[in-house]
Image (cartoon, helix red, strand yellow):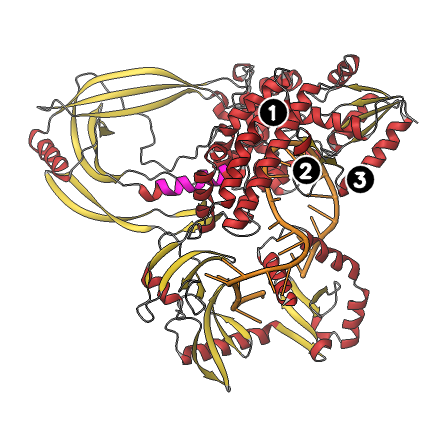
Amino acid sequence: MQKNLVIVESPAKAKTIEKFLGKDFKVMSSYGHIRDLKKKDLGVDLAHNYKPLYEIPADKKKLVSELKSAAKDADIVWLASDEDREGEAISWHLYEALDLKNKDSKRIAFHEITKNAILNAIENPREINKDLVDAQQARRVLDRIVGFEVSPVLWKKVKPALSAGRVQSVAVRLIVEREREIQDFKTEAAYRIQAIFTKEENGTKYELKAELNKRLKTKAEALSLLEHLKETNSYQIDDIVTKPVKKSPAAPFTTSTLQQEAARKLGFSVSQTMSVAQRLYESGKITYMRTDSVNLSSLAINTSKSEIESVYGKEYSKVRQFSTKSKGAQEAHEAIRPTYMTDSKVSGSAQEQKLYDLIWKRTIASQMSDAELERTTVTIDIANEDDFKFVSTGEVLKFDGFLRVYLEDTDDEPADADEESLLPPLHLKEKLELKESTATERFTQRPPRYTEASLVRKLEELGIGRPSTYAPTISTIQNREYVEKSNIEGVSREYNILQLKKGKISDSTKTEVTGADKNKLKPTDIGIVVNDFLTESFPSILDYNFTATVEKQFDNIAEGQEEWTHLIDTFYKSFHPVVDEVMNSHTDHKIGERILGTDPKTGKQISVKIGRFGPMAQIGTQDDEEKPTFASLQKNQSLTTITLKEALKLFELPRVVGEYEGKEMQVAVGRFGPYIRHNSKFISLPKGYDPYSITEEEAIDLIEEKRKKDSEKTIQIFGEGDNEIQILNGRYGPYITFQKNNYKIPKGTEAKSLTEEQCLEIIKNTDNTTTKAKRGTKTDKKPAKATTGKKTQTAKKQTSK
DNA sequence: CAGTGAGCGAGCTTCCGCTTGACTT
């Protein structure tokens, strides 16, 4: 019907653009890429100069045929995907897949979604930039070759179904190396000397807090200083310096900075931030949320300016243009900002409102004046002492500027620096009285573990990964069980305090908790083993600069200075032989194996390594006549640190603790912790019970307790065996369970009064296709917990035998 | 949902970057 077909990447964008263009234009969306390398095998024809073998993925077939027929009907097809490497490739794939050779098709691009920008783009169409497309093909093919050649090496050498890649493997490396730094970190103690001085002026008493200009290494030094203070007790203000300080607002949000601030200020996970932002974007409240640009459109700058001037006054406004400094940024979009700067609040869920508020404030603040402070530094001289002085600083806010709206948080661990505050009136050469002085033993801080958001920041800094992949990458390395979010309990540590007060020096000890961590990324044994293997075998790929180096070469291709196949050829010729060599290299021990010693009972070798189901210990070797025996490591144990004694203990389980009702009670540790098995039922051991020492009586009590709880859970039971219908009390209220399916009880129905017939009715009326479909997708998808994958594997094995 | 695990078979797993979807016990 319409003469013109415009194709953009995102449906939300299509909707807005259609409004601007009027009825001669139909706007459709490609939903990102429409073609990709073959899903199976390498997808690159090595024998024919690395020809990429493209296919339309199954879930895109319908869309592509719709686009194709719409293109057929149109006079002109406008390819309006983003103006970056990936966007250019999307246009080219559309051109090829929709068969636009004999059609009038034009490539256009716009950075802002405004009527002017779009009309301007339509007046200035161009050809598809094949060099840029080739740069994308090089990127795509390189990633495929790396991923699909290195992963199989891991399957063979470490464990099936593992993965390696240009981005994920480096992300894991960062986390492993940080953990090593933490392990190797040696804390150093030093004494921090603080003092409180007093003075009087016009009948008012003032206090002044100050700190010694140096920390003292030993207790003896600290003590001798306090002794000196006690003896001389004479202090005078030596210097007062006041200077203005300016603070400037941070740039508007990119994907990465939004993820960081939402984590710090709102406690959102990286993926949570993205899905909330997606909803805000789809409802037209914010601009696109996957961007590496800090640029604001002139419209946004102007509306911010008038908003600031009307709400806060002219002196709060300062127009700023930010420039992107992150490596490899492609800047196809604007920064993340509110669509309408005049809306300081929006409707929606609590999360949406909070995230929007953050985005609004950050954007507004970025267009506001600097905050102006006055910082005063006072130096206090100690009589008969040349090396040491006390120093006190105070800050006065002269003009709040952008601070009125927004201050960026930092990731730094809470430092023990005092908050800088207002100083009392002070004069040069003035004498002060010492009220007290305290020497506190302080320790250097170990490096922090990465959070999801700080890992994203590091990856961005290294130019690794893209806004659209930060969240998925973090999921991948956790799904593969290379890293996990851990809660680490701290240990308590003593520290020493010396205090001079009223002419006496006291010495006391206090304790503090140190090393605790919550929700931080920590490598697993598999992560450590895989990382060490990869960094040794493929050092160039694991190099932190690998991406940055190849990005430069992609740029050369984009500028037409190099053939993309030439780059890939050079890479492959040096890379592939290494893969072959590593794959075929024979080692007499498995990757990551540690030999701990010999079993005192049998004299056989005890070792630990990664097995098919994760880290395990084993007695004996495959060369022994008898088969070796195995035991999984427990959750809190690690391949790298487990001792012979701890390993031997693992083989004491499962253990029979006794009998109850004529059936054995067996204790063991499973995936969900220690449990008792009795009459083929499982009962978890609550905290405080040790599977190695639990007694028969304790076990019986726990079984009885569990039975009591279960009976409270059950409301009614009908039938028996396969026809058993249970009405249970669940987390979300009562529900019916029948043949391993759960059914909702209609609102307003009393669960207790249901009859068997009514239950069957509910079961019959529940749309079974949806529950089945749900189950289908669940197994199709990546196993959320690794168990589904393992289950099918073992099941297959058994049937084949 | 808690067991498993060292060699005949057969075939599976895997990358990075663009996009959104359909779900609730």
The range drawn in magenta is A170-181
Q: Nearer the viewer, residue A321 or A72?
A: A72
Q: Mark 2: which amino acid?
A: Gly
Determine crowd level at label 2: few under 14, some 14-19, many 20+ residues with C-alpha closer than 10 A: many
Q: Is A180 within the magenta?
A: yes
Q: Residue at x 69, y 21 (%)?
A: A112
Q: Do the CB atoms of the residues marked 1 and 3 lie less than 8 Å apart? A: no
Q: Earlier in the sequence, mark 1 or mark 3?
A: 3
**Left or right of A245: which side holds A263?**
right
Q: Residue at x 42, y 50 (%)?
A: A592
Q: In the picture shown, does residue A61 fall above or below A769? A: above
Determine crowd level at label 1: few under 14, some 14-19, many 20+ residues with C-alpha closer than 10 A: many
The answer to which image quadrant residue A102 occupies is top right
Task: Measure the C-alpha gap from mark 2 to mark 3.
Answer: 18 Å
Residue bearing mark 2: A43
Q: Mark 1: which amino acid?
A: Ala
Task: Measure the C-alpha gap from mark 1 to mark 2.
Answer: 35 Å
Q: Nearer the viewer, mark 1 or mark 2?
A: 2
Residue bearing mark 3: A61
Q: Earlier in the sequence, mark 2 or mark 3?
A: 2
Q: Nearer the viewer, residue A564 or A585?
A: A585
State which chain disc 3 sits on: A
Q: Earlier in the sequence, mark 1 or mark 2?
A: 2
